[in-house]
Image: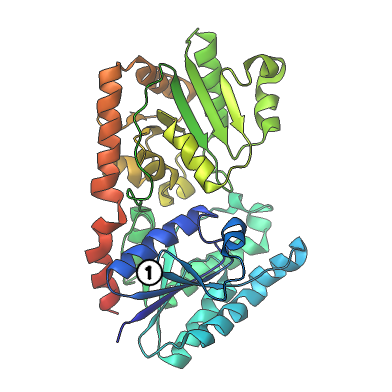
């Protein structure tokens, strides 16, 4: 009998968040490994609209089960923090799980983690949690005075280790839980190179993209300072494209220069659905990503790195975390700068601008091959299957 894996949380599936992307590739790898995969989550609105009156929801062979949250943001927050576990277990009851089937949780909500673990114990099921972040107190509105921070710390220290196994996204997180004796599988963000075709770029203009997503771990100030420096030093035929950033944020930095430079030096794209975002990526040459070194950036693995590389986009990135330490190679499939500073970032951008057409084409192809050989989910199927089979 085929073993079932139910992946649950609130990640706006499919394609509604970085977590949703991580879950999608995990689910596809599990299906390829012979599991029946169900997802319980909020469902992305445009996907739902395309389904019409369908009684059952499916996506790429995944069975979808929708949980619906209130439109009232205060009640929705209450649901997320205190009712989400019960909402999910009601859906679990409908799936018909057998002994040793697996519940996979993607959430940093403590009450949900505990509720799922209780449910699993009662029904002889296994539990796995993926850990995609390691937040610091600065992530929370009131810092160390914020009760949500202390609840999060309790979950990180006491609740995560209660699960049968953990899947950390980075070595920084993995090392922490390995030392505690937890069963872990280190798994970075994956990709699916078969989903959209790679395109060849023919324009003379060098185009950089910075896609923001959710609460920002990236250093926007350094990137804006660097863009200003590029302009001041007279570089032509260079464009910087932003998505997920408010126009007011960029306007505040450039002040009276904003109207003159907007839609010439930099372009601010309003909200785009996923297909529109992919079309933007396919027109770009470089991904620009500057990050400070901190607990959060060491622990995180930005999905935008392999996601953009899938289309031959070359990362121009500061050195922090697994993606520069373990996967990308400077001057081969990426351009890396050692310090998160304006000068260091500027020098990296100049390196990118100065690439000949042949050099840029070779580096773009290497970026694509890096994703194909190292990030594509099919490469991870044997490891994932062994890990899940062993539970």
The answer to which of 337 and 52 lies nearer the viewer is 52
The answer to which of 355 and 182 lies nearer the viewer is 355
Q: Mark 1 packing: few (<14 Cα in 10 Å), some, or many (20+)?
A: many
Please say whether residue 329 is visible from this viewpoint: no
291 shown above or below 184: above
Is residue 93 found left or right of 263 in the rendered image? left
Return the x and y of residue 219 as percentages of the image width and height. Answer: 53, 35
Please say whether residue 159 is visible from this viewpoint: yes
Is residue 332 found left or right of 146 in the rendered image? left
Q: Residue at 43% of width from left, 48% of height from top?
A: 303
Farthest residue, direction top: 234
200 shown above or below 385: above
Q: Residue at 32% of width from left, 17% of height from top?
A: 355
Q: Residue at 34% of width from left, 44% of height from top?
A: 323
- The residue where tag 1 is placed is 166
Quarter of the image for residue 44 reads bottom right
> Helix, strand, or loop for circle 1?
strand
324 shown above or below 125: above
Return the x and y of residue 248 as percentages of the image width and height. Answer: 71, 31
Q: Residue at 48% of width from left, 31% of height from top?
A: 209
């Amino acid at each position: 009998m085929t073993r079932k894996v139910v992946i649950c949380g609130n990640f706006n599936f499919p394609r509604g968040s970085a977590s949703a992307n991580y879950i999608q590739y995990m689910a596809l790898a599990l299906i390829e490994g012979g599991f029946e995969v169900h997802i319980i989550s909020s469902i992305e609105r445009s996907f739902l609209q395309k389904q019409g009156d369908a009684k059952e929801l499916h996506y790429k062979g995944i069975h979808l089960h929708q949980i619906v949250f209130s439109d009232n943001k205060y009640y929705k927050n209450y649901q997320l923090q205190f009712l989400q576990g019960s909402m999910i277990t009601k859906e679990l009851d409908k799936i018909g799980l057998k002994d040793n089937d697996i519940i996979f949780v993607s959430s940093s909500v403590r009450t949900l983690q505990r509720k799922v673990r209780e449910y699993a114990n009662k029904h002889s099921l296994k539990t796995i949690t993926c850990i995609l972040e390691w937040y610091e107190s600065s992530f929370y509105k009131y810092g160390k005075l914020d009760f949500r921070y202390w609840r999060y710390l309790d979950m990180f220290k006491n609740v995560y280790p209660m699960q049968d196994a953990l899947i950390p996204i980075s070595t920084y997180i993995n090392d922490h839980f390995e030392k505690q004796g937890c069963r872990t599988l280190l798994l970075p963000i994956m990709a699916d190179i078969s989903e959209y075709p790679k395109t060849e770029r023919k324009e003379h203009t060098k185009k950089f993209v910075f896609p923001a997503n959710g609460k920002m771990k990236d250093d926007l100030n350094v990137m804006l300072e660097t863009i200003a420096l590029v302009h001041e030093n007279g570089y032509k035929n260079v464009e910087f494209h932003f998505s997920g950033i408010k126009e007011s944020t960029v306007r505040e930095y450039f002040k009276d220069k904003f109207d003159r430079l907007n839609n010439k030096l930099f372009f601010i794209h309003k909200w785009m659905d996923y297909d529109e975002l992919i079309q933007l990526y396919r027109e770009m040459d470089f991904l620009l990503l500057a990050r400070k070194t901190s607990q959060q950036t060491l622990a995180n693995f930005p999905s935008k790195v392999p996601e953009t590389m899938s289309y031959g986009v070359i990362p121009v990135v500061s050195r922090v975390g697994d993606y520069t330490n373990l996967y990308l190679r400077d001057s081969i499939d990426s351009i890396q700068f050692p310090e998160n500073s304006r000068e260091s970032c500027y020098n990296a951008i100049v390196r990118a601008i100065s690439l000949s057409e042949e050099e840029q084409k070779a580096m773009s192809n290497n970026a694509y091959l890096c994703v194909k050989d190292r990030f594509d989910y099919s490469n991870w199927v044997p490891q994932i299957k062994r890990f899940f089979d062993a539970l």
